[in-house]
Image (spheres, grey):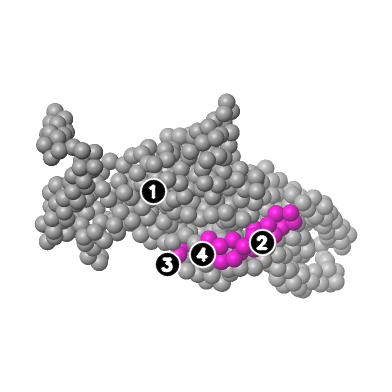
């Protein structure tokens, strides 16, 4: 598991520097939309890794190494969670910093909510990626981008119109995302195992 | 004990099928897997590593059923080199080493570094800038650096220049100095296999045509060269396959045991035998 | 111990090993009790098949030239060198008897045969 995460880290670090800078930029930009976008955008990192793995057929080689299917599947989720949480934390720190300098409004609630949106996006789309792969799943990529942009836009719309305080129903995203994740992991594992048959 | 035992394995995908494959590689020996492209070599390797599940039949590797949960731990003991399946392209040799150190419990970084030196592989260069030969060398370095007992090599000498190929064959030869070390190697460079192997297994269109001891194969067959009339006078049961050489000349692959010992025969290479057998199969 | 393996001849590799080691034992170049390289080491050094090497050793053992001590390796047999030489002598006798009969069948005298033998051995020494 550690090995797989380390590999993904190297891949992201080398190839995704632009991507990471983008996240940094979005987190730093004032305004809630950008911060939320950064967090949900971070949920896309696992897909970049999947794409890189597929290009060099790493999955075939990984099947020969002592990795369990569980590790191979779970590492994608964990990477997404770490990326989402990392972006969330980063945004929070930067926004706090701006508040001190610029006396700007900061909405920690919306950032936390956006982390759970990120969880849900991962839970919905990862099983599809395990079923079809990135190469064959172009449509899924569109779904992912749509989910990312849509939810980020919706969340920031709500947040801005209510000046930072989210209405209670939005917090339903917390149990929803947890339930989705709990269902998603076994499904991914099942579909991943099926694909290797 | 057998290092690898495949027992009546069947696996079909669409038009291609592995049919009733039974193959044993005794511990301490090197088995060469030969076959045309698409004969089923890579599929066989994926089946025995449990990367594919057979439709029927069983596979046992290093004494453990590959479909059992215990097989995951056995993979620690198996060094694998695949044809055209690599590490993610942006990784460097140094990074591959760090990832593998967390992958294999018995990873030995000193051994890995010594192979990188020996193969003159750069530490920092990204994998995508490697030549095919360098990719192979890195994969071999990884396979050798976690104290394996079995090497499974799919076209591991492809893309290497003759001098490096010789060096690599020497490494594989030395690997089997221990009597519990075994190798299964597929290649279409038959001269490599002839140098290295104890057994030759020949796959043709998803079927195993034979798996024989190499020297028994080379000693058991001979090549008769003569005129068509001379060839006609040979016992038909002794002639496995024949081909016309033009201008009246004929070459035949014959079984030595079925012809008089006085008959002058040339010693075949593994390549001769395989080529003749493929032709023989096609003419049937 | 000296072994020269040729791939070009029609003599099987195991037989080349068998004959060469046997010759060296009979000539005394390999002394009784001397250790032979292990099957695996010999195979890997000569870059030949382990199975072929094992077959040559099995053959040598079956004919009493070497013996195996479990876990220690293979050694040149010591006590039966005389018997082996005696066997060769008997072999020679059969060949000579056959030669005599052959000579008789084509009307050669014993004198002719002796001359032939002298000629042959002269050829060999020169």
Identify the magenta region: B1-23
Question: Which mark is on residue C83?
Answer: none
State if disc 1 and disc 3 touch (CB < 8 Å): no
3 or 1: mark nearer the eye = 3
What is the number of the mark on residue B173? 1
At which x and y percent is residue A67? 56, 62
| Disc 3 and disc 1 on one polypeptide chain | yes
Q: Residue furthest front?
A: C107
| Closer mark to the observer between disc 2 and disc 1 | 2
> 10 Å neighbourhood of mark 3: few (<14), some, or many (≥20)?
few
Task: Give the residue at x 85% y 71%.
Answer: A169
Q: CA distance from mark 3 to mark 1?
A: 20 Å
Which numbered tag is attached to residue B1?
3
From this view, report whether residue B160 is shown above or below residue A59.
Answer: above
Residue under circle 2?
B11
Q: Chain of mark 3?
A: B
Q: Secondary structure at mark 1?
A: helix
Q: Are marks 4 and 2 on the same chain?
A: yes
- Label the magenta part by its dominant secondary structure: strand
The answer to whether residue C79 is seen in the rendering is yes
Chain bearing mark 4: B
Labels 2 and 3 positioned on one and the same chain = yes
Q: Position of residue C106 (x, y in %)?
A: 24, 38
Confirm whether the magenta stretch covers residue B16: yes
Q: Earlier in the sequence, mark 2 or mark 1?
A: 2
Q: CA distance from mark 4 to mark 1?
A: 22 Å
Left/right of residue B67 with respect to residue A37 in the rendered view? left
Residue at screen point 25% across, 66% down: C70
Pointer 4 residue: B5
Image spot of residue B246 (x, y percent): 59, 28
Cβ–Cβ under 8 Å for marks 4 and 1: no
Which of the pair B211/A23 is nearer the observer?
Answer: B211
């Amino acid at each position: 598991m550690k090995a797989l995460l380390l590999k993904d880290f190297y891949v992201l670090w080398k190839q995704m520097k632009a991507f990471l800078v983008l996240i940094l930029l979005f987190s730093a930009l004032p305004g809630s939309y950008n911060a939320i976008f950064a967090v949900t955008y971070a949920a896309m990192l696992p897909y970049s890794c999947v794409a890189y793995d597929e290009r060099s057929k790493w999955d075939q080689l990984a099947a020969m190494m002592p990795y369990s299917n569980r590790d191979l599947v779970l590492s994608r989720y964990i990477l997404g969670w770490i990326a989402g949480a990392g972006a969330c934390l980063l945004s929070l720190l930067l926004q706090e910093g701006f508040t001190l300098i610029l006396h700007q409004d900061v909405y920690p609630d919306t950032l936390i909510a956006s982390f759970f949106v990120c969880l849900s996006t991962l839970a919905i789309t990862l099983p599809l990626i395990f079923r079809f792969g990135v190469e064959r799943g172009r449509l899924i990529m569109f779904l992912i981008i749509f989910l990312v942009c849509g939810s980020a836009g919706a969340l920031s719309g709500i947040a801005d119109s209510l000046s930072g305080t989210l209405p209670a129903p939005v917090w339903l995203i917390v149990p929803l995302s947890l339930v989705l994740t709990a269902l998603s992991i076994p499904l991914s594992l099942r579909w991943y195992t099926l694909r290797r048959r | 004990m057998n290092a690898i035992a495949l027992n009546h394995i069947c696996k079909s995908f669409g038009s291609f099928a592995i049919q009733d494959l039974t193959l044993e590689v005794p511990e301490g020996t090197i088995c060469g897997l030969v076959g045309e492209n698409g004969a089923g070599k890579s599929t066989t390797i994926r089946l025995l590593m449990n990367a594919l599940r057979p439709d029927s039949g069983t596979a046992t590797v290093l004494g453990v059923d590959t479909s059992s949960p215990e097989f995951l731990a056995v993979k620690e003991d198996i060094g694998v080199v695949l044809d055209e399946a690599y590490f993610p392209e942006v990784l460097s040799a140094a990074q591959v080493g760090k990832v593998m150190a967390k992958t294999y419990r018995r990873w030995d970084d000193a051994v890995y570094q010594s192979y990188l030196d020996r193969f003159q592989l750069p530490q920092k260069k990204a994998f995508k800038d490697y030549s095919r030969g360098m990719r192979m060398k890195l994969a071999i370095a990884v396979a050798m650096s976690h104290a394996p007992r079995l090497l499974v090599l799919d076209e591991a000498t492809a893309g290497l220049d003759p001098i490096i190929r010789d060096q690599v064959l020497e490494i594989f030869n030395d690997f089997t100095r221990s009597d519990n070390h075994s190798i299964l190697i597929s290649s279409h460079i038959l001269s490599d296999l002839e140098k290295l192997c104890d057994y030759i297994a020949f796959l043709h269109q998803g079927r195993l045509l034979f798996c024989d001891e190499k020297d028994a194969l080379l000693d058991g067959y001979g090549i008769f060269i003569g005129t068509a009339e001379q060839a006609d006078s040979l016992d038909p049961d002794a002639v496995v396959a024949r081909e016309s050489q033009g201008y009246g000349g004929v070459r035949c692959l014959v079984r030595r045991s079925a012809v008089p010992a006085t008959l002058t025969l040339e010693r075949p290479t593994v390549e001769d035998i395989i080529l003749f057998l493929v032709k023989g199969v096609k003419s049937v | 111990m000296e072994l020269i393996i040729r791939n070009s001849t029609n003599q099987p590799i195991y037989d080349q090993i068998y004959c060469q080691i046997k010759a060296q034992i009979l000539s005394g170049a390999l002394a009784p009790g001397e250790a032979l390289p292990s099957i695996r080491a010999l195979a890997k050094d000569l870059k030949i098949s382990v199975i072929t090497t094992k077959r040559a050793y099995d053959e040598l053992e079956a004919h009493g030239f070497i013996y195996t001590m479990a876990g220690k390796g293979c050694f040149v047999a010591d006590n039966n060198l005389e018997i082996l030489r005696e066997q060769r002598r008997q072999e020679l006798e059969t060949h000579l008897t056959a030669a005599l009969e052959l000579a008789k069948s084509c009307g050669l005298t014993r004198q002719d045969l002796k001359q032939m033998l002298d000629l042959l051995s002269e050829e060999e020494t020169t």
